[in-house]
Every structure is written in structure tokens, then in C-alpha cells.
Image (cartoon, rainbow, N blue to C red):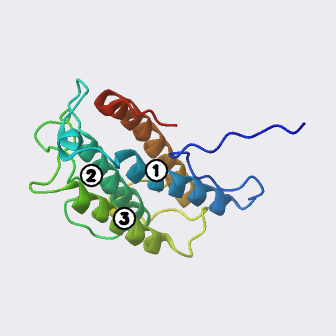
Amino acid sequence: MGEQQAAPRQDALREPGTSVDDPNELLVGFLDGYREALGRKLAGLSEEQLVVSRVPSGWSPLGLLWHLTNVERRWLRWGFAGEQLDDVWADADPDETDAPWRVPAGATAASLLAGHRDEVDRCRAAVAGHDIAERGAPTGRFAGEEEAPTLGWIYCHLIQEYARHLGHLDITRELADGRTGE
């Protein structure tokens, strides 16, 4: 008798297929899987649950969303592409380095989710057509550095940022409403 496979979890991470052998496609595929998972993990939380911190460090789920939006900007547009951007540290408190991520006044979950999707689209456009072996621009984030990291290194950094923070979000989500993630 054949084994039955369990149905995939609703929040299961979308990963590239195991037959994918192109390194760029693999890295972008894993990064996109985490980008998509972020919205799913926030879905269903009330506005109050999105702004309340459940951890001693003080960050909220919306703060984490805003942070990851700015991480995308800093590493891909300002870092790799060398775009000159205003307020690249918009998620940080300039007066207190250990403070939780700031959320813009008046921001809502809908506006920040839309902003994250828009930023991801701008970041995709900024790196479109570039090889993962290419180094970031010697301007912007990497001005004055001896050597900027490669696009592949930046992708790996973003993957670990998302993986770590989505794990944090799983814990805060479980504390908020009991829902567990992958």
C-alpha cells in the first residue's frame, strides 16, 4: 500500500524545486519564499496585535515588517545598486541604537504591507539582469569599503535576515493568538 502524504501546511514556505540547479534562481527562489511568508504570518492579526510587543526587546510585528522593508532598501538598492536614497535607516531610532524598530506615525498594516511589496518590486528591478558574482556599487552603503560584497552574498544575507526574523514572528504570533508557524 502506498504512503499517504500529509497535506502541506497553510503557511508552508514556498521553496524552489529540488531540480533547480541555477544558483541565481535558487537564491532568488528562497528569498521570494521568505518574502511571501512574511505577509502570511501577519495575516489575521488585529491592528492591536500588530502594534503590541510581546518580547522584552520591545519590537512589534509591524515594526518587524517595516524593518524588513528597510533591510531590502539598504542592501539591494542603496548597497548593491548604489542608489542615493533618503532616510535609509528609517526603521531605527538615531538616538538609541538598542531601541526597537520604529514604525512611521500613522502607518497601518495595509500601508506597510503594500509598501513592503512595492519595495520588493523596486529591489527586483534594481538587480534585474545582474549576475550573483557581481559586486555591489562602490557608492551608497559600500562607499569607502575596500570591496563591496557580491550580489550572491547579499542574497544570502537577506535570506538569513528573513529566516531569523520570521522565526521571531512565529514566536510572537504564538504568544498573540496561539497560531504556530512552520
- For label 2, the SS is helix
* Percent x, y of residue 74: 34, 57
Q: Is residue 129 something that shows in the picture?
A: yes
Q: Tell me if mark 1 has few (under 14), some (14-19) or many (20+) residues whose alpha carbon lies within 10 angstroms of its own.
A: many
Please report contact status of discs 1 and 2: CB closer than 8 Å, yes or no: no
Kindly identify the amino acid type of the residue bearing the numbered disc 3: Arg
Q: Tell me if mark 2 has few (under 14), some (14-19) or many (20+) residues whose alpha carbon lies within 10 angstroms of its own.
A: many
* Percent x, y of residue 130: 56, 71
Residue drawn at point x = 9 percent, y = 57 percent: 106
Q: CA distance from mark 2 to mark 3?
A: 11 Å
- For label 1, the SS is helix
- For label 3, the SS is helix
Residue drawn at point x = 46 percent, y = 56 percent: 36
Q: Is residue 104 left or right of residue 113?
A: left
Disc with the residue nearer the chain's start (2 vs 3): 2
Q: Is residue 139 something that shows in the picture?
A: no
Disc with the residue nearer the chain's start (1 vs 3): 1
Please report contact status of discs 1 and 3: CB closer than 8 Å, yes or no: no
Q: Quadrant of the N terminus?
A: top right
* Percent x, y of residue 141: 34, 58
Kindly identify the amino acid type of the residue bearing the numbered disc 1: Ala
Q: Does 44 sit above or below residue 75?
A: above
Q: Is residue 54 left or right of residue 17?
A: left
Residue under circle 2? 66
Disc with the residue nearer the chain's start (1 vs 2): 1
Residue under circle 1? 37
